[in-house]
Amino acid sequence: MDSDFSLLEELVPDLLKVLRQRYLVLEQISLNAPIGRRNVAQHLGLSERNVRTETEYLKKVGLIEIKNFGMFLTEKGKKTLKDAAPMIDRLFNAGETEVKLARKLGIDRTIIVPGDADLQDRVYQEMGEALSSALNLLLPLGHSIVTILGGLALAKSAKYLSGNLANNRELEFVPGRGALGENVMTQSNTIVQEMAAQTNGTYKTLYLPEQVSDVAYNSLIREPSIADVLQDISQSDAVIHGIGLAQEMAKRRGYDSIKLSDLREKRAVTECFGCFFDDKGKIVDRITQVGLQFENLKKIPHIFAFACGNQKAEAIKAYMPNAPRQTWLITDEGASKAILKGKATSRLK
């Protein structure tokens, strides 16, 4: 991040959050006018109350008009939006390649760190530091709940979160799913503990199988300890998730050879939140899981997709048509170059 951004981030973090939020509200109104507050809130993952506060201010300063049929920009608003775009890109460290990748994927923001994680382990430190800076920018002061889903990249990067995140914040980390029966170091229950330790925060755990039958699921979610974690998940300020390769994730979930063959026939490329997606972004298979549900993701204010390496490029591209607009992708040059050049490595063999 450049020196201007770092200085503003230290001195007036709330100012940056308000600036970005008002810019995004203006942008949504410009793109979808005439539009109502509810639709703006849904597009941005904000509460209607939050959007109402911002739009009343924008109307007061003459940037928008609010009518019964919806909101639209005034001429002053159009000029302000156009003039603000370069400053927003510079302040939030969005380089030309990051802007291009975000537009290609249809999400709010991408952060690209140097290198290729498939070849260089140092990339995970860069990824962790980038995540830390993004959280510091976007998380509100006071109490915040951050939901974590497991994965190797997050597990390797968690120790690089900065203790500065704790400044004026009380961070609570919760797992977004149960265990997969995999290496304990890559499970969300372990990662939340590491992140809490790095940021002087607290954490909760969810020690139960992620994949359960419908009958077991309906029973488990009524257990007080599990219901408590699920309540926190529903009130999350941010979600951090990986993007898995379909065949690898299916094997970790205990799929037999017949089911694995079925996934290949359906051309499943990636897995997120218990959903398997093909190369067009269509859900081709799904499991019943305890934890964060895919349909509820759009209600979360801030979402960070965390995936890196050339081998993940196709999986990232396959998932992104389903990603809520407010998603930030944190990735590396290995994945970003492959996506932008259309040379993602195939994992369908």
Image (spheres, rainbow, N blue to C red):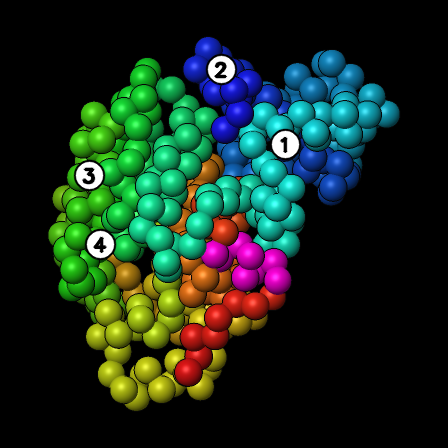
Q: Residue 7 carries which label?
A: 2
Q: How far apart are marks 1 and 3 (CA)?
A: 32 Å
Residue ID at (25%, 32%): 172
Residue ID at (42%, 54%): 116
Q: What element carries label 2?
A: helix
Q: Is residue 275 visible?
A: no
Q: Distance between the residues labelled 4 and 1?
A: 34 Å
Q: How far apart are marks 2 and 4 (CA)?
A: 35 Å
Q: What element carries label 3?
A: helix
Q: Which of labels 2 and 4 is toward the front?
A: 2
Q: Which of labels 2 and 3 is toward the front?
A: 2
**Is label 4 in contact with label 3 (beta carbons under 8 Å)?**
no
Mark 4 or 1 closer to N-term? 1
Few, some or many residues within 10 Å of mark 2 (<14, 14–19, 20+): few
Q: Position of residue 295 (x, y in %)?
A: 44, 55
Above or below residue 347? Residue 2 is above
Q: In front: 335, or 227? A: 335
Above or below residue 199? Residue 128 is below
Residue ID at (50%, 42%): 111
Q: Residue 186 carries which label?
A: 4
Q: In this view, does 92 lie to the left or right of 85?
A: left
Few, some or many residues within 10 Å of mark 1 (<14, 14–19, 20+): some
Mark 1 or 3 closer to N-term? 1
Q: Distance between the residues labelled 4 and 3?
A: 11 Å
Q: Position of residue 131 (x, y in %)?
A: 39, 37
Magenta range: 334-341
